[in-house]
Image: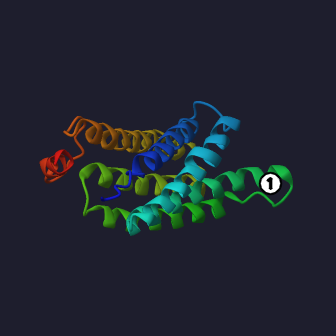
């Protein structure tokens, strides 16, 4: 009897999506960074995605392992960058250094976006919009422009919401055995038929 493993991706996408939306509401200028964002970054955006990355490893999914583990650790490093100076563990990073940090994440995400082109449009949109977000945030830090930061915030909200949508599409489409929320598959009915078989 075949042991069917659950799809861990929706959990990782929700952790990423919800945390990204909340941080970018801050970036858009609506409220300051506080314990709510830091806690989401540590646990749902950070720890949950690392766990999902390990689960994707078990399924033999290199793309999922690389993406979820990396972005989980991104959230943990981001929280560390905010909290460590407050605890006196390390000096705060200058804005230009943070710009390079964000550029490196943008480059990584750009390569992941290229990988996502093999998959459905919803996945492509998440990675494409995240690539744009990292470079917008880097531009904000390099220039000190609050306006660019605000644009990045709104773009990041869209990115996070797209991840939430993709997560819920996977859950609902699997539960109902048909397309409830479309994800832009080239052959969406094939997956539905396979589920129903």
Q: Residue at x 32, y 53 (%)?
A: 123
Residue farthest to the right, as pictured: 88
Q: x and y percent of residue 22 in the render?
A: 55, 37
Residue farthest to the top, as pictured: 30
Q: Residue at x 14, y 48 (%)?
A: 193
Q: x and y percent of residue 117 in the render?
A: 26, 62
Q: Residue at x 64, y 55 (%)?
A: 76
Task: Tell me if residue 34 can be seen.
Answer: no
- Residue position marked by numbered label 1 in the rendering: 85
Q: Is residue 193 left or right of residue 11?
A: left
Q: How is the image coloured?
A: rainbow
Q: Quadrant of residue 89?
A: bottom right
Q: x and y percent of residue 28 in the render?
A: 53, 37
Q: Residue at x 16, y 49 (%)?
A: 197
* Label 1 crowd (10 A; few <14 / some 14-19 / many >=20): few
Query: Considering the numbered disc 1 on the image, is that residue within a helix, a strand or a loop?
Result: helix
Tally of numbered discs: 1
Which quadrant is the N terminus positioned in?
bottom left
Q: x and y percent of residue 39 in the render?
A: 66, 41
Residue farthest to the front, as pictured: 1
Which of these two is toward me, 186 or 129?
A: 186
Q: Is residue 192 left or right of residue 80?
A: left
Task: Tell me if residue 154 can be seen.
Answer: yes
Which of these two is toward me, 174 or 63?
A: 174
Which of these two is toward me, 24 or 48?
A: 48
Establish if 18 lies above or below 113: above
């Amino acid at each position: 009897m075949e042991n069917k493993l659950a799809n861990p991706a929706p959990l990782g996408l929700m952790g990423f999506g919800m945390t990204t939306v909340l941080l970018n509401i801050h970036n858009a200028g609506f409220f300051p960074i506080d314990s709510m964002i830091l806690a989401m970054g540590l646990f749902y955006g950070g720890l949950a995605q690392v766990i999902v990355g390990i689960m994707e490893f078990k399924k033999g999914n290199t793309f999922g392992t690389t993406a979820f583990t990396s972005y989980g650790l991104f959230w943990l490093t981001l929280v560390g960058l905010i909290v460590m100076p407050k605890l006196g563990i390390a000096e705060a990073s200058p804005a230009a250094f943070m710009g390079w940090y964000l550029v490196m994440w943008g480059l990584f995400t750009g390569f992941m976006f290229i990988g996502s082109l093999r998959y459905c449009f919803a996945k492509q949109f998440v990675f494409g919009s995240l690539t744009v977000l990292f470079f917008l945030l880097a531009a904000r830090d390099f220039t000190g422009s609050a306006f660019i930061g605000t644009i990045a915030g709104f773009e990041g909200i869209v990115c996070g919401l797209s991840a939430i949508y993709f997560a819920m599409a996977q859950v609902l489409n699997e539960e109902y055995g048909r397309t409830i929320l479309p994800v832009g598959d080239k052959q969406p009915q094939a997956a539905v038929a396979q589920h129903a078989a």
